[in-house]
Amino acid sequence: MSVSVLCAVDISNRDQDVGVLRQAARMADLDSARLDVMTVLPDFGETWVSGFFEKDHHDKAIEAAHAQLVRLCTETLGEERNASIRHVVATGTAYKEILKVADAARSDLIVVGAHKPDLRDYLLGPNASRVVRHAPVSVFVVRG
């Protein structure tokens, strides 16, 4: 029985993650669990790359990502369902941030997508496979 389900989506793959989001919502609804939906932005702030961006670039990127995440949830699940979702935007390495958010939210289940796998990843994307290997809770992988 799940109390909290964390769904990780890549907002740059909008159409591909619609199925991931729908599956996470179905699984959360089965147990009347809270649904948290997150996305992870790359961290440009701690590298020499950050010098090429305006100082408020990160804040603007977070705001834009949050708006896009809310829009994805609303368009996919409807306004009523979206109202009860916690939307989270993290910055950093995708699998590390997914695990951090799952721990902080005390998630019982993590739902991730596996898109465009490379043969060296044994038919599972690199972030999804790392989440599966390192998560202390169950992980449901939705193939896209």
Image: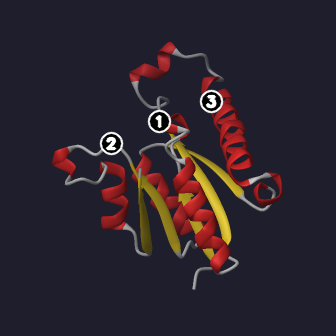
Would you call the spot at circle 1 few (<14 residues within 10 Å), some (14-19), or many (20 or more)?
few
Q: Quadrant of residue 6?
A: bottom right
Name the image quarter holding residue 122: bottom left
* Residue annotated with mark 2: 116
Identify the residue at horizontal 58%, vertical 73% (top origin). 106
Kind of residue indicated by mark 1: Pro
View extreme (bottom): residue:
1
What residue does disc 3 label? 61
Which residue type does callout 2 highlight?
A: Lys
User: Marks 1 and 2: which is nearer the front?
Assistant: 2
Element type at marker 1?
Answer: loop
Give the residue type at disc 3. Ala
Identify the image quadrant of the N terminus. Answer: bottom right
SS assignment at label 2:
loop
Task: Determine whether, in the image, residue 56 is placed left or right of residue 83.
Answer: left
Q: Position of residue 80 (x, y in %)?
A: 83, 58
